[in-house]
Image (cartoon, helix red, strand yellow):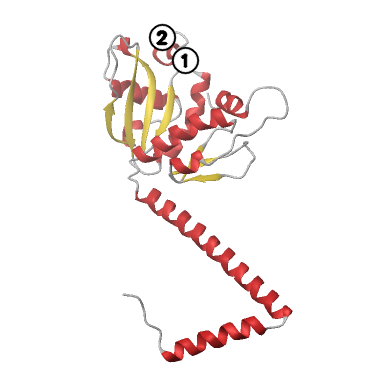
Amino acid sequence: MAHTLTQRELELRARRDEIETNAPDWHQLFLSDYKATTAANELRFEAIEKKNDCILRALSQTDENEIKISGILTSLNVPLIQSAVKILQEIGLSSPMNFILDHREWPVKENESHQSIIVKLVGGARETVLRYSSKLKEKTAQSIFGSGGNTRIYINQVYPRHVYQLLREARNASKSLNYAYPLVKNMIVFMRETRDSDLILIKDSSDIKRLRPRTIQAPGASPTQRDERMNE
């Protein structure tokens, strides 16, 4: 139900309008600046609220501290978890089973020569494993298992479904927009025009759709292509 103004409220509004109408120029200028500042603050508060909502939503995602180890040959004929343990030992973990809480095998397609495993780690262990995983660049299946030639092994972080799907959209968009490779911090997806640009908060697909393509001035590979090579 609409609020019915009292006689006193009507009088105050009429008085306010009279004052504003007859006020000197400096007062009108002050009033205009005041209204502009108020509107700008409201937009700033709205942006802060949206960012807080995004952070709270990200924190509510269940982070299982999981990693995905891929590139393991199906021809090894040993339990997949044994292969995962050996890989973790190769990158520097002396007793990997002390850090593993659970695991599950990634579905293998028919005639697939490689397989993957999802490993759930104790809190804090995933960051250590991901940091050590750079050592795999110097190793092959042959050097780890004694067979498999130059097949590469990869270790990647497993994100909650919502984060993974949004990151996948951001990766696809970064190619068409000529943006640098997107990244995830604290389960929040960010995009960036170049590797040194400010991070752009991505809350959902609509944020990606609002981004404008980046024009590459100098010839050569796009920043996305360069980043992809660095992330291989």
Secondary element at image label 1: loop
Q: Which residue is mark 2?
A: 148
For image coordinates 63% across by 41% down, the residue present is: 197
Q: Residue 221 or 14: which is nearer the viewer?
A: 14
Instruction: Tell me, yes or no, whether the two marked residues, 2 and 1, touch with CB atoms within 8 Å.
Output: yes
Task: From the top left corner, tell me how far across and down residue 15 is, in percent.
Answer: 56, 88
For image coordinates 49% across by 90% down, the residue present is: 11
Crowding near the residue tagged with mark 2, few <14, some 14–19, many ≥20 C-alpha atoms within 10 Å: some
Q: Tag 2: residue type? A: Gly
Q: Residue 31 or 67: which is nearer the viewer?
A: 31
Sequence order check: which comes first, mark 2 or mark 1?
1
Q: What mark, if any, has residue 140 been given in the picture?
A: 1
Q: Tag 1: residue type? A: Thr
Q: What mark, if any, has residue 132 been given in the picture?
A: none
Q: Quadrant of residue 98?
A: top left
Q: CA distance from mark 2 to mark 1?
A: 8 Å
